[in-house]
Image (spheres, coloured by chain):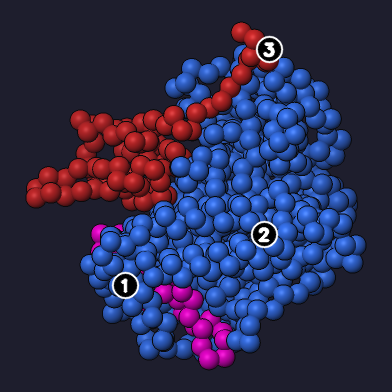
């Protein structure tokens, strides 16, 4: 679930849902309750727009294992 | 669920389809000339498109820095990734000659075009040549351009992707159809416009990505799904150069653009530099290897000589700090910095494997003239969707500006034309309702997966032949039939994605026809049945246009 919402901090303003380039985030309303939901996590581009623009800094990005950053020491992998 | 329809028709002079960098700049230029302008944007212009989070290179000609010898400038820029063969030379000259106007304008609206205080050119450069890529800080570019557009009276409609362009009986543009996806239930919006500009970006997600199970792991913005190409082709606009599409390169399983922002050397597994351009990491030049030969990472793997790495272990501490915490932020790819930190990867001792990304149609698409107009009167295009101009960000926004200016003259020559009874409206409503009400409908990802497989297996970047392409085209048509009959969508978001995949299938058709018709091998196009390069096709661009009498393929001279 790429963007992770800290629900204790989230003020449910909906700004992240508005600006997400991929329309991944939604504000779900159930009765009087509102909740910020990562509704389409597989469509996340990991661009961090939500994280950067969140007015209360309630979002951080988790990079999925599918997107692993492959790295190698320049000794040809001997160590 | 049914789609609703907004009764009020949105009337404007100039409808901008896509509020990315090209679209916003075009809107600003048109509004500055007094036009009534509406932007219809799929997401939100403050953070949408491939420039959503920033850019750091702006290819430009600044006479006080580069001298008065414009021919030298043209020749040297042509050697960078913003030049090359698949751009009309006149278009290169056009965007280059007006690039400084944009630089000055952007500086005036608060985009930091010289964060060091002076004109600083870095990266994407051929060692020994002058440098032309202005190193700027574009992290606020979308919000700054959005504000500039609003200040000039542009009306921005976010969360409103466009799905049809409306033509009158004479074949000129009179409007468009969009869908408001801001609520769970979609709403059809009708636009009456004297002119439109398609600025919807490239066509991504046509081929399997580097992580096929995660289709949105792409270097360009995955919202750019090729709808602009499809709108143009269905409207009878001429497309060009789809057969010359290639791919980008970057971190192998974490697709990001901005390869030119890295300061390092392309190296083998032992850390030895494998390219001839420089033997030390250069902040001034960047590593041009990935610009000149972005397919090299794939080819070396297939030849058994890979893998290949971006090696920053010899980069100075100062340059490394600058790259990770300054340049990547300006370019909007600081997800890489964040990702490296979370994984505790230190570029001081570890190299990052680079990979070649799959084909996307960006700078292959709508054939435009020096005013940015397509062959359909009133239909302009700029940015990744245009097919005969490159220049990355600069090419996109200069052509956007040129089109906006010319539109001001064009709209004076045409009458407003009512669209409320246009037959396309009912057809689109019926189709949306069919998709929304289909019980047990197929999910859009099913069709997207098959499209990507067909594109890759029958028209891949490696080898093509008459039999494979003929079969692929037949399968593509089978997929279209099945998709139209069985796809379903549960809400406005899924409807958007479903219409995207139908558009992508629509673009697959002219692409297959063009690669079938190019009976030679050239650039990224390899035919096993026509292995030679036909010299008679040098300096010619293949074009395709859908007419009432069928599809017409041709090779035109570049100009």
Residue drawn at (68%, 15%), measured in percent from left and top?
Answer: A76
Query: Going by the image, does B10 lie left or right of B311?
Result: left
Which range is magenta?
Answer: B162-190
Q: Chain of mark 2?
A: B
Drawn colour of chain A? Answer: red
**Where does the C terminus of chain B fall, quadrant-wise?**
bottom right
Numbered disc in front, either 3 or 2: 2
Numbered disc in front, either 2 or 1: 2
Secondary structure predominantly adopted by residues drawn in magenta: strand
Tell me where residue B307 appears, x and y as whole percent.
68, 28
Residue drawn at (42%, 82%), measured in percent from left and top?
Answer: B424
Residue beneath disc 2: B468
Tell me where residue B33 appears, x and y as whole percent.
56, 71
Residue beneath disc 1: B434
Residue drawn at (81%, 38%), measured in percent from left and top?
Answer: B126
Residue beneath disc 3: A75
Q: Is residue B453 visible?
A: yes
Secondary structure under the numbered disc 2 in the rendered image: helix
Residue B169 covered by magenta stretch: yes
- Tag 2 and tag 1 share a subunit: yes
User: Farthest residue in the left direction?
Assistant: A31
Tell me where residue B447 appears, x and y as whole percent.
45, 58
């Amino acid at each position: 679930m790429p963007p992770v919402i800290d629900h204790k901090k989230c003020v449910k303003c909906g700004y992240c849902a508005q600006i997400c380039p991929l329309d991944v985030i939604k504000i779900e309303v159930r009765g009087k309750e509102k909740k910020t939901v990562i509704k389409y996590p597989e469509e996340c581009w990991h661009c961090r727009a939500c994280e950067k623009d969140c007015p209360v800094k309630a979002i951080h990005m988790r990079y999925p294992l599918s997107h692993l950053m492959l790295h190698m020491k320049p000794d040809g992998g001997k160590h | 669920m049914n789609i609703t329809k907004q009764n009020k028709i949105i009337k404007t002079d100039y409808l901008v389809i896509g509020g990315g960098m090209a679209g916003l700049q075009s809107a600003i230029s048109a509004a500055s000339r007094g036009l009534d302008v509406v932007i219809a944007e799929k997401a939100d212009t403050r953070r949408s498109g491939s420039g959503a989070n920033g850019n750091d290179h702006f290819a430009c000609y600044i006479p006080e820095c580069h001298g008065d010898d414009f021919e030298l400038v043209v020749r040297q820029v042509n050697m960078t990734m913003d030049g090359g063969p698949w751009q009309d030379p006149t278009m290169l000259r056009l965007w280059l000659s007006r690039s400084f106007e944009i630089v000055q304008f952007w500086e005036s609206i608060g985009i930091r075009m010289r964060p060091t205080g002076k004109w600083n050119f870095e990266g994407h450069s051929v060692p020994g040549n002058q440098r032309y890529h202005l190193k700027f800080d574009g992290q606020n570019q979308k919000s700054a351009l959005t504000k500039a557009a609003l200040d000039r009276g542009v009306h921005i409609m976010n969360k409103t992707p466009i799905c049809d362009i409306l033509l009158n009986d004479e074949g000129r543009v009179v409007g468009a159809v969009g869908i408001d996806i801001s609520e769970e239930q979609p709403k059809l919006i009708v636009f009456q416009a004297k002119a439109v500009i398609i600025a919807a970006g490239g066509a991504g997600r046509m081929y399997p990505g580097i992580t096929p199970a995660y289709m949105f792991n792409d270097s360009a913005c995955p919202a750019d799904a090729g709808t602009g190409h499809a709108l143009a082709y269905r409207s009878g606009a001429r497309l060009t150069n789809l057969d010359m599409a290639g791919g980008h390169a970057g971190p192998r399983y974490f697709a990001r653009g901005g390869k030119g922002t890295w300061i390092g050397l392309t190296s083998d597994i032992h850390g030895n530099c494998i390219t001839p351009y420089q033997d030390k990491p250069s902040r001034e030049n960047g590593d041009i290897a990935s610009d000149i030969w972005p397919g090299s990472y794939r080819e070396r793997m297939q030849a058994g000589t890979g893998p290949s790495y971006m090696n920053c272990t010899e980069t100075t501490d100062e340059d490394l700090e600058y790259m990770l915490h300054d340049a990547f932020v300006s370019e909007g790819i600081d997800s890489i910095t964040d990702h490296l930190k979370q994984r505790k990867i230190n570029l001081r001792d570890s190299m990052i494997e680079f990979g070649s990304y799959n084909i996307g149609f960006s700078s292959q698409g709508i054939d435009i003239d020096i005013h940015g107009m397509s062959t359909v009167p009133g239909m302009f295009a700029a940015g990744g969707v245009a097919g005969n101009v490159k220049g990355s960000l600069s090419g996109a926004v200069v052509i956007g500006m040129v089109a906006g200016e010319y539109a001001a003259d064009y709209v004076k020559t045409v009458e407003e034309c009512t669209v409320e009874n246009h037959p396309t409206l009912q057809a689109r409503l019926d189709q949306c309702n069919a998709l929304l009400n289909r019980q047990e409908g197929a999910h859009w990802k099913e069709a997207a997966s098959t499209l990507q497989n067909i594109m890759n297996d029958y028209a891949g970047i490696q080898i093509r032949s008459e039999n494979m392409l003929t079969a692929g085209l037949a399968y593509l048509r089978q997929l279209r039939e099945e998709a139209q009959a069985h796809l379903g969508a549960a809400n406005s978001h899924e409807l958007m994605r479903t219409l995207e995949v139908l558009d992508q299938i629509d673009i697959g058709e002219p692409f297959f026809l063009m690669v079938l018709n190019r009976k030679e091998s050239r650039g990224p196009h390899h035919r096993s049945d026509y292995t030679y390069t036909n010299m008679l096709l040098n300096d010619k661009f293949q074009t395709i246009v859908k007419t009432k009498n069928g599809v017409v393929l041709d090779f035109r001279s570049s100009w």
